[in-house]
Image: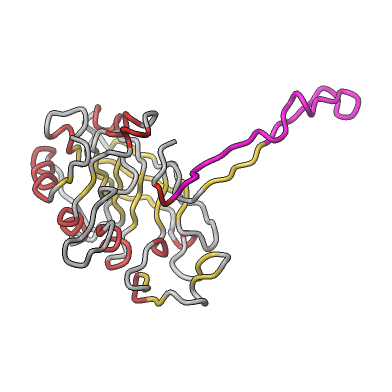
Amino acid sequence: MPTHPSHQPGYFYNLYRQHRSTYDPQEHGLRSSASGMIVTMEHAGTHIDALCHQAFNMKLHDNILVDNEIETPFGFNKLSVETIQPIITRGVLFDVAGLKGLDYLPENYEITKQDLKKCALIEKINVNRGDVVLVRTGYGKFWHNADKYMKAAGVSLEASKWLANKNVFAVGADNSAWDLLDARDKESGTTLPSHALLIVEKGIHIIEHLNVEKLAADKEYIFIFLCFPLKLRGATGSPIRPIAIATK
């Protein structure tokens, strides 16, 4: 699957015990079993970022210093993914590609605050405190074409600030990093600047590798958003299976 360079090798599954190798009528009768082993980065596939995932000047959200007590070989003792409660909240979709009449945005296009504001006007949606905001670039359709998918559009720092000021709970997009992969703040030189803003400064979670094609096709711009991160103690993120429930 497409994987951000920071999170290679991504995901691996091995069917370790197979029915063909465990079938033993003399010992188990006619029953057989199969089971496999999963090896994965927390940030492979559709996943949510914990607040310990990013630091700025070696400080996490809430000004927590990254030291040996907080960051251990076995994970984090603060702000790790098991601290995220089950998410059941209002979700909204900004179909930016659809707004522009496109199946997908131009490669490496940076979504602006004006794009989001115009989208909200056309879709007749507003953003409330505690919402989960999803953005469609259209690159979800290229999930099986990693080279194309990794050139997806991303959300600008300006647009992220606009959403952060509305006190959303989380944001997410159908790309690998929310930001553009090569995004850099002109003032500080910080790479992936929206990650630093949203996670470290504002305490807002980021969800990546979403599939929002059906929501966009059905014009479901407001919905109930469900998401249950795994309680992986000390982890910086978790694979998730988010669900949107239509309200109309």
Which residue is painted at 30% across and 47% down in the image?
A: 172
Q: Quadrant of residue 104?
A: top left
Residue that lies at the very extreme toward the right in this rendered image:
26
Q: Nearer the viewer, residue 186 or 22?
A: 186
Which of these two is toward me, 22 or 30? 22
Residue drawn at (29%, 63%), measured in percent from left and top?
Answer: 196
Question: Is residue 28 inside the magenta stretch?
Answer: yes
Residue at 18% from the left image edge and 59% from the top image edge: 161
- Coloring applied to the structure: secondary structure
Horizontal side of residue 60 vs 70, given as left or right: left
The count of marks equals 0
The quadrant where residue 130 appears: bottom left
Q: Position of residue 4 (x, y in %)?
A: 39, 46
The image position of residue 115, as x and y in percent, is: 11, 44
Report the magenta residues as a range. 7-35
Identify whether 74 is placed above or below 215. Answer: below
Query: Based on the displayed image, in which of its 4 quarters is residue 135 positioned?
Result: top left
On the rendered image, what quadrant is the N terminus found in? top left
Residue located 58% across and 65% down the image: 74
Q: Position of residue 49 (x, y in %)?
A: 39, 55
Please tell me whether residue 26 belongs to the stretch shown in magenta: yes
- Check the picture and name the quadrant holding the C terminus: top left
Residue 28 image offset from top left, x and y in percent: 85, 29
